[in-house]
Amino acid sequence: MDVEANPRVLEELKHFGVDRVPALIIGDGSFQGWNPRQLAAFVGVEYRNSESLSLPALTELLDKILAAAQGVMEQVPDKHIGMKSPGRDRTVRDLGFHLFRLSLAYRDAIEEAPFSEECFLEKAPVEMVNGEAVARYGQMVRQHLKEYFTLLMGYDGDISTNYGHQTAHELLERTVWHAAQHLRQLYVFLEWMGKIPIDPLTDAEFKGLPLPEEIW
């Protein structure tokens, strides 16, 4: 079930102080957000961190994902820019914008603490009327991040988020797999439009990311 597409379930979650998913509720307690270390403590198990990608590997992979997303958005016909995800009121235009915006949010999180997920709720500005416009925004995001990572490659301090503290590395990993998941969804959108993605990234290139098996 797509929780975000079910107003009744979302209303029930608010009684536990949860306003967004992912979230976990056990008894009267709740845990919100993506923080494996704190989630392990919440459920009472030992946290064992699997080997994660290095900072340079994550930044390189993020740029590859953003470049691929640019290519997808450039392929989206204008007549399909309003196509929506199954069970959710989100267009392919907003999904493409969201993928780029959430990636830029990593930079914002370091510069403008504490980190907030409000930007994840933003929709594409009205002037982004088609896929090419969203792709141009994506190019701007890529350029900003390339410049930023060049200056900040060694940073790995703590970042305050709305679901607790994370290291910059943990938040970057989350940012990369989040973008990768949405790229997978954009590929499905293209298939529904009768298009074949040009040089798509494969699952092998996402190795090392904690991606779910489900696309939606």
Image (cartoon, rainbow, N blue to C red):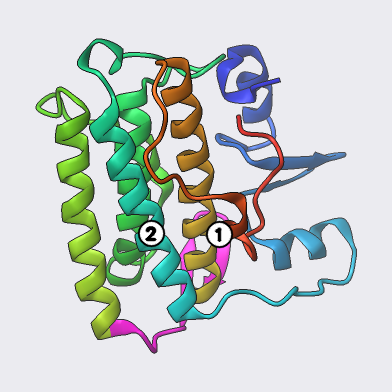
**Sooner in the amino-acid sequence: mark 2 or mark 1:** 2
Residue 165 in sight? yes
Residue 50 vertical placement versus 199 (above, below): below
Q: Which residues are magenta?
A: 152-166
Disc 2, SS:
helix
For the C terminus, give its image quadrant: top right
The residue positioned 25% from the left and 19% from the top of the image is 77
Residue 56 vertical placement versus 80 (above, below): below
- Of the numbered discs in the image, which one, if any, rests on residue 64? 2
Q: Are marks 2 and 1 in contact (CB under 8 Å)?
A: yes
For the N terminus, give its image quadrant: top right
* Front residue of 22 and 72: 72
The x and y percentages for residue 66 are: 34, 52
Disc 1, SS:
helix
The residue positioned 72% from the left and 68% from the top of the image is 37
95 relative to 178 in the view: left or right: left
Give the residue type that dot 1 points to: Glu
49 relative to 143 in the view: left or right: right
Residue 168 in sight? no
Decide: few, some or many residues near mark 1? Use Cα within 10 Å; few <14, some 14-19, many ≥20: few
Distance of label 2 from label 1 (alpha carbons): 10 Å
Residue 9 vertical placement versus 98 (above, below): above
The residue positioned 54% from the left and 44% from the top of the image is 181
Image quarter for residue 143? bottom left
Give the residue type that dot 2 points to: Lys
Q: Furthest residue to the left? A: 127
Which residue in the structure is indicated by mark 1?
A: 205
* Front residue of 95 and 193: 193
